[in-house]
Each structure stands twice: as structure tokens, then as C-alpha cells.
Amino acid sequence: MSRRVPEFAVVTGVFLGISALVSGILLGWGLYATVVVGAVVAYPFVGFGIVRDDDPAATIKPQWLLAGGGVVAAAGALGVLLDNPTPRGVLVSVLVAAALGAPAAGYATRYGAGVNPLPPRTTVFVGAVAGAALLAAGVAVGTPFVGAGAGVAAGLGAALYGTARGVTFDRRTKQVAAAGGGVLGIAIVAVGVVRGGPLGEWLLVGTATALVPSLYTALTAESGGRSRRSQW
């Protein structure tokens, strides 16, 4: 009986997602709204099934879920671009794609889908560069909050992927990264002060940027502790 619960939850999630898709098409919700509603109703059930399953990879193949998540993320991003084909829309589409695709990507990483052609360290570097570029783009087009969200998703996601694939950073490196994030966050707030106007978004962006290295350290503390214990 316990084996059927996870599988039934997954089937229920898929059924609800398809139902939302059909409803969106019939009611003319638009691509973006349809995809988001479908993901909101489907993901919790699929996630419940994964958590409750003793062997999730046998029930849901990581490659299949990653492919499905990629389609959902791409459709959501396309829906945003169709409604807002501007530089700001591009940034929002990146953020939406990251939010919709992150659960599937995390599952695939956890259970070894093995579809990333880049080495783990290269992935971390590319993610950091992409995160910085998205942050800078958000500042340039006047949407620092969106740029920060997309940048954090890219940079932190790549770093967590690297950790899951065996990339480790010593304490000194993490301390330097935390200090650098703090300095960069202060610099971003300073830019907002120089530009004038409301500082709310600039403060949020600066805070988010400053906290990313510390958040990474907190999220990987357990894995770091296990690696140190294994050395002894």
C-alpha cells in the first residue's frame, strides 16, 4: 500500500497539470498563466510522491522529469516574452524559467540524470558569470529586483549543482566570497543612492547579493561536515 501512495500522488499531479493546461486553452488564459497554474497544481503532488517514495528514481526517471521541467520552463518563458517582448521581458522570462525549472533540475541533480556536458567546476564558473551578468542587466534596464532574482537563481543554482557533483570550497574561500558579496551589496546600494529616487529595490538587491555566499555556506554546511568526517 505504501508503494502505491507515491505513484498515485505523481499520477494525480500529472492529471491536474494536464487538466489545467486544457482549461487554460479552452478559457483563453494565455500561455504564461496556463503554464504557471499547471505547475502550481501539479508540482506539489509530484513533490509529495518523490518525498514519500523509497526509490524515487525508479518511479520517476530523472531524465524524464528534467525533460518535462525543461518544457514547462521554456513554455513559461515564452509566454512572458509573447506578452512583453522587451529587455525587461527577457529578464522576467529568465526568472520565470528558473523558478519553473528549478524543481526538476534539483531532482535530476540529486538522482544523477547526467545530462550536463560541462564539468562541475566549469558549471559553477559559468553560473557565477551568468548571475553577475543578469544582475548587471537588471541594473541597466531599470529592474534591479528582477535581475537580482534571476542572477541569484543562476549563481546559487550552479554552485549547489557543483557541490552535489563533488566541488568543494575550503573555509577561507567561503569567507572571501561572503566578504566579497557584502562589498558588492554595499556598492549596489551606493549606485542606487547616486541615481536618486526610491531606494527600496536597491536595498533589496544589495541585501540579496550580500547574502548569497552566506546562503550557499548554510545550505552546504551539512555536506561539508560529512566530507570532513570522511577524511578522518
Image (cartoon, rainbow, N blue to C red):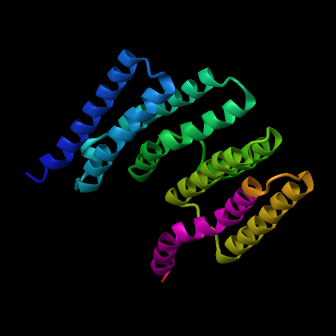
Q: Residue at x 75, y 43 (%)?
A: 138
Task: Determine the main secondary structure of the stretch shown in magenta.
Answer: helix
Q: Which image quadrant is residue 86 in?
A: top right
Total numbered labels: 0
The percent coordinates of residue 193 (x first, y second) are 88, 58
The percent coordinates of residue 224 (x first, y second) are 52, 73
- 90 vs 45: above or below: above
Q: Is residue 12 rendered to the left or right of residue 105?
A: left
- 224 vs 120: above or below: below
As for residue 165 lying within the magenta part, the answer is no
In this orientation, does residue 126 appear?
A: no
- Give the residue furthest to the left: 1
Q: Is residue 218 rendered to the left or right of residue 129?
A: left
Q: Residue at x 52, y 29 (%)?
A: 74
Q: Foreground residue, 142 or 221?
A: 142
Q: Is residue 115 rendered to the left or right of residue 107?
A: right
Q: Which image quadrant is residue 208 in?
A: bottom right
As for residue 229 lying within the magenta part, the answer is yes
- Give the residue furthest to the bottom: 232
The percent coordinates of residue 145 (x first, y second) are 69, 49
- Give the residue furthest to the right: 194
- 74 vs 167: above or below: above
- 126 vs 177: above or below: above
Q: Foreground residue, 178 or 57?
A: 178
Q: Which residues are magenta?
A: 203-231
Q: Residue at x 46, y 80 (%)?
A: 229
In this orientation, does residue 228 appear?
A: yes
Q: Residue at x 19, y 43 (%)?
A: 7
The percent coordinates of residue 62 (x first, y second) are 37, 41
